[in-house]
Amino acid sequence: DLHVEQPPDWLAAGAEVEVEMGEEGLRGSLYGGKVLQLRKGKALVQYAAFCVEAEEEGGGDGEAPLLTEWTSTRLLRPPPPPPPPGFPSQLPAGKLLSLLHDDGWWEVRLLESRPA
């Protein structure tokens, strides 16, 4: 490939990212991680929520290391800023949102809002 896309300015080794997942059962969700290296349109990402399977590491009784893998930089985005105060009360019904579930962000639609 003669043309390798340059990563955006915010993307560098050490950057916190969200990775769009493509695996069955996770497709469309986003999981947090940290960029360890960049190379030719790919990033070596260490996930915050996934550990290496015991059989991949040869077993053992210690804590499993965090999963680290190469992924396309096109699947990465910076984490969003924290929501402003009173954010939930400002959301209209029908709004698309991201919901944190099992350490991953999933797209959902707000059906209705009730006062706390």
Image (cartoon, rainbow, N blue to C red):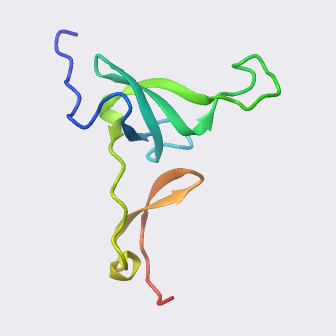
* Residue 73 is at least partly visible in this image: yes
Q: Say whether residue 113 is left or right of residue 72.
A: right
**Residue in the foreground of this view, choosing between 20 and 87:** 87
Location of residue 110 in the rendering, given as x and y in whole percent from the top left corner = 42, 73
Residue visible at 44% across and 82% down in the picture: 112
Does 40 sit above or below residue 98?
Answer: above
Q: Residue furthest front?
A: 14
Residue visible at 36% across and 67% down in the picture: 83
Q: Residue furthest top?
A: 2
**Residue in the foreground of this view, choosing between 73 and 80:** 80
Does 32 sit above or below residue 55?
Answer: below
User: So how many labels did they put on this image?
Assistant: 0
**Residue in the foreground of this view, choosing between 4 and 112:** 4
Q: Residue furthest left?
A: 3
Q: Which quadrant holds residue 24?
A: top right
Location of residue 47 in the rendering, given as x and y in whole percent from the top left corner = 52, 35
Location of residue 81 in the rendering, given as x and y in whole percent from the top left corner = 33, 57
* Residue 21 is at least partly visible in this image: no
Location of residue 94 in the rendering, given as x and y in whole percent from the top left corner = 35, 74
Q: Which quadrant holds residue 86?
A: bottom left
Does 96 sit above or below residue 88?
Answer: above
